[in-house]
Amino acid sequence: MALPDNTLSTQIDSAPFTGAAQLPVRSLIDYESGGIAIQDPSEGLLYQTWRARILNDGTEIVLDAREVPAFTAITGSNISEVSLAFDQNMHPVLAYVEAGLAKLYWYDTAQGMQVTDEWPGVVTPRVTMDDKRPLQSTKSDVIFAYLKSGNLYCRQQRDRYQTEYLLQESVNRSGLIKVSMNRHFRLQFLLKP
């Protein structure tokens, strides 16, 4: 896991993001490195760049990649933000905001299906696989990060997102832009001013 003891490093080691995370992100579009197809991790999680877009006046979240035609992953209304990740089995994980409410769409192994959880009070929800390198597959995790009440928090897939970890109090920022691995192999949080 890229967050030892569920805490931030005391030394800042800022560097450019790696893979698809280095592409510009906006609230209506996000990019993530991923496998060859949904539910197909056979070529690893760094095979191609995937894109998540909010389309049709905020009623759809559409995913696509170089070798995967666009398809609708989520339908709703007033969807205003999206963040994309994949778990180790190439199930999509989407953090998004619909009608002002943060939501997380993920594969729950206990139920054997994709589920959507709601997170009242959460601002700028973002997701990432903390380390996509094949040698780290047993240690990696999908991280769900966000601001709430002015503090930076995260949750992990290994906990089924049930445990909230306080990473930093009083961040004095309006939200998260993205969270992903940087070139120094550190999980990096990019905050809005």
Image: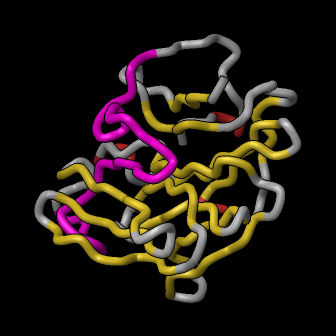
Regarding residue 140, the answer to whether it shows in the image is: no
Residue 35 falls left or right of residue 156: left
**What's the residue at 35%, 49% (across, down)?**
32
Reply above or below: 157 against 19: below
In the foreground, 154 or 101: 101
In the foreground, 109 or 71: 71
Q: Is residue 160 magenta?
A: no
**What's the residue at 35%, 77% (across, down)?**
72
Q: Residue furthest left?
A: 67
Q: Quadrant of the C terminus?
A: top right
**What's the residue at 45%, 49% (across, down)?**
129
Residue 27 screen position, x and y as percent: 51, 48
Residues drawn in magenta:
15-42
- Name the image quarter holding residue 89: bottom left
Residue 84 falls left or right of residue 78: left
Q: Quadrant of the N terminus?
A: top right
**What's the residue at 50%, 86% (across, down)?**
113
Q: Is residue 33 magenta?
A: yes
Residue 66 falls left or right of residue 3: left
Reply above or below: 43 against 172: below
Decide whether the magenta segment is chiefly helix, strand or loop. Answer: loop
Q: Residue furthest front?
A: 57
Residue 99 screen position, x and y as percent: 68, 68
Regarding residue 62, the answer to whether it shows in the image is: yes
Reply above or below: 79 against 168: below
Residue 19 falls left or right of residue 11: left
Residue 78 screen position, x and y as percent: 60, 69
